[in-house]
Amino acid sequence: MPLLGVDQRLVDSTLIKTVVPLADARPIYLLVGTDESQVVIKKELTFNHHDKDNLHYANLAMHRVSPAFLAEVCLPFEVEVLRSFVDMYISIADMTFTLVPAEIDHLDNALQSGGAWFKMSKAEEVRDLSEAMKQLSDHNDKSGVRQIAAALRRGGLESLGKIIAADLFNGNVDRFNPYFTNRFGQEKRVGDRIPGPPPQQQFAVLLNIGNVLFSMQQNESRPIGLDPYDRQGHWRKMNKTIRRLESTSPGGEDWPGHHLKNIPQETQWRARFATLIAEDLETALGPRNRKVAVLSSRRLPRNADARILTGMNTGINDLKNTFNRSRLGPIPAGLRDRLHILGW
């Protein structure tokens, strides 16, 4: 059995051999055990004591629809093990009159600023859509967009749809923005800027290009639901009812999870959302150069929107089964309210 892992309790700092920061400005680290086992730890800035529960349920929802994303909130004693690991290196540096290693100092600063920590499995060969688009625009390198397009055609459209369903349930709008209509139902463009010279256009709903992520899973590139939790998001608060959250929504928006309901109005909304997502992805990937005019320049199949919609509907069923109240036991009032609204 490996010493480190998402399902393994972190019980002894001497089992950790090294720590590697994975993002210069963000508290994400790869821990390597003395047996070479690995686990990623990440900190989310929290604002109240309920955020650990919020994070737990957001991660649970995403793992159900994107199994490659596996995460568990660290228990308090596991955070103390991390502190012991840092303290050991600081003591050695003091005794030997040497500098504290940069990676230890990085982790020390993250631990001192509080927050909720969680463990997640290491995703292999992670690539995001923005990286592929930059390769194309800066170097005319199409390898990235070709790989992503191939991944979407091979079943990734359905996988992405499932991830979108979990984002709607969690209220995470940092991937695709569900608020593309105003109060009168008129559509607007609410996505990220399309790279290129002015005047720059906006995507319809693709809000954060860098959050459309792919990783190698079973020797194939597939979408992965990394970053399912918006640590400053209004809808993350599982301890508060939807009515209360909607009454204090900064922009007057409703909870995105309403769109998971099994009623004609929301079925139509999901179909439109899927269409806009498919159009944005096609725009992001760019046209294929074709020497024969009759051949399609599209990178995605023409039924991409229907396949995304299929994935969303499958994701809804997956989430319904995951949050079966008879198996959950005591749950926060806000989560119970969400399940009641959706008829789950």
Image: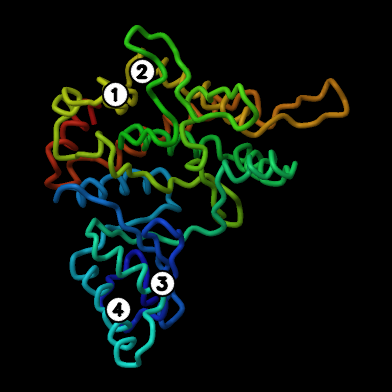
Of pointers 2 and 4, the one earlier in the residue sequence: 4
Q: Residue furthest front?
A: 97
Q: With respect to residue 129, does 264 lie above or below?
A: above
Decide which of 129, 138 is in the foreground and name it. Answer: 138
Q: Identify the residue at image location x=37%, y=68%.
A: 106
Disc number lying in front (1 or 4) = 4
Q: CA distance from mark 1 to mark 4?
A: 45 Å
Q: Amino acid under label 2?
A: Glu
Q: Nearer the viewer, residue 195 or 307?
A: 195
Q: Is residue 3 left or right of residue 244?
A: right
Q: Callout 2: helix, strand or loop?
A: helix
First in sequence: mark 3 or mark 4?
A: 4
Residue under label 4, please give it.
85
Q: Nearer the viewer, residue 260 or 249?
A: 249
Q: Which residue is mark 2?
A: 266
**Quarter holding the C terminus?**
top left
Residue 274: give x, y in percent of width and height: 49, 24
Residue named by callout 3 = 103
Residue flagged by tag 3: what amino acid is it? Answer: Glu
Disc 1, SS? helix
Mark 3 or mark 2: which is in front?
3
Contact flag, marks 3 and 4 (Cβ < 8 Å):
no
